[in-house]
Image: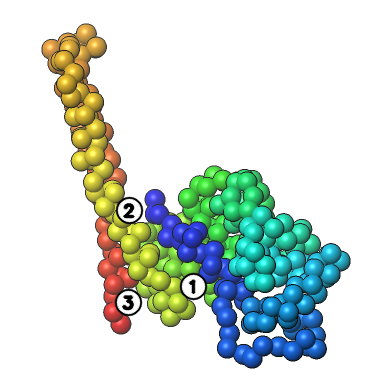
Amino acid sequence: MRVNQMVWPILYPTLLLAFGCAERQTTEPQSMSREADELTTDLNDIQEPEQQRFALDQLRVRAAQGDPEANFRLGQAYSNGLGVEKDSERAFEHFLASAEAGLAKSQVLVALMFHTGEGTQHDGEEVIKWCTRAAEQDNELAQYWLGIFHEGGVYVSRDPERAFELYTKASDAGLAEAQAQLACCFALESGTIRDMAEAERWYRTAFKNGADLQVIRSDLSTTALAFANYPKERMEKHRAKFENVPSKPCSDPVLSHLTQEQYEYDQMMMELQVIQRELRPEIQRLSDAIALIDQVAQQ
């Protein structure tokens, strides 16, 4: 029942950064006599327009020959406006060509672009297809996102146990975001048994590896507040439904001594009692996870 913390506008630049594209280094501009591989690898380092054009021309030649890495780097160029106008559709075309050639880091980007509709149409089946292909190559980002989708029941049937397995694989590969999600699984008893010692261990590992635990904390707090406020919101909706509506007898003849409003109110209160009993342990687990994150962040 947990809200997933990673938001696409935050994640997409992070992905590009992780693939060596978004961050400008401080090395000197390369000479045009360097090997094309080195030029294209450091495309974001090149400041001279002529050198950028040369590097991009080399990439286009290699991409036309079906080189998946060249297509990937052209996709980066169009995503970030490196020597070209930003063009998400062109970026998608190059990432897709690279993905079809089997490059896992392109496959996960294609999946996420299908997820957001960035440069292409939104398509949930394609999201899962490309994420799965990349995950099968042990790409930790793909494993992480497949975990997100399985945990939330997005494009696939909800499967917390499968999500836990995927988070574990990505965590073992060192992905901080997956480690934070794995910690939440242990803290919230999602897909595994509750184990606060393991939750603490993975929160600490994620924090050490750069995960933003405050983002996770905010999501957990929002979820706990939503659970706590649910009964009040239901009651307000009930009142709004019957506001300025003349009272009338209950439609059930046996209960005709009640108004329809009273009858529905009684039914709602019985439902809320059941829901509150179910939510109480969920809220407690969320509160415990928040307290654990605070403890980790302060040490």
Q: What residue sits right under mark 2 in the picture?
A: 223
The quarter of the picture where the C terminus appears is: bottom left
Q: Which residue is mark 3?
A: 297
Q: Is residue 20 left or right of residue 67?
A: left
Percent of width and height locating residue 113: 61, 55
**Residue sitting at 27 percent across and 68 percent down?**
291
Q: Position of residue 236 (x, y in %)?
A: 20, 35
Distance from the alpha carbon under mark 2 to that under mark 1: 22 Å
Could you tell me which residue is drawn at 26 percent across and 57 percent down? 284
Which residue does the numbered mark 1 point to in the structure image? 176
Disc 1 to disc 3, how far (Cα)?
Answer: 15 Å
**Number of residues whose C-alpha sits closer than 10 Å to that of mark 3, classed few (under 14), some (14–19) or many (20 or more):** some
The residue lying furthest to the top in this view is 253
For label 2, count other residues whose C-alpha is less than 10 Å away and answer few (under 14), some (14-19) or many (20+): some
Name the element at disc 1. helix
Which residue occupies 56% across, 45% down? 155
Residue 241 lies left or right of residue 137; in this view the side is left
Identify the amino acid type marked 2: Thr
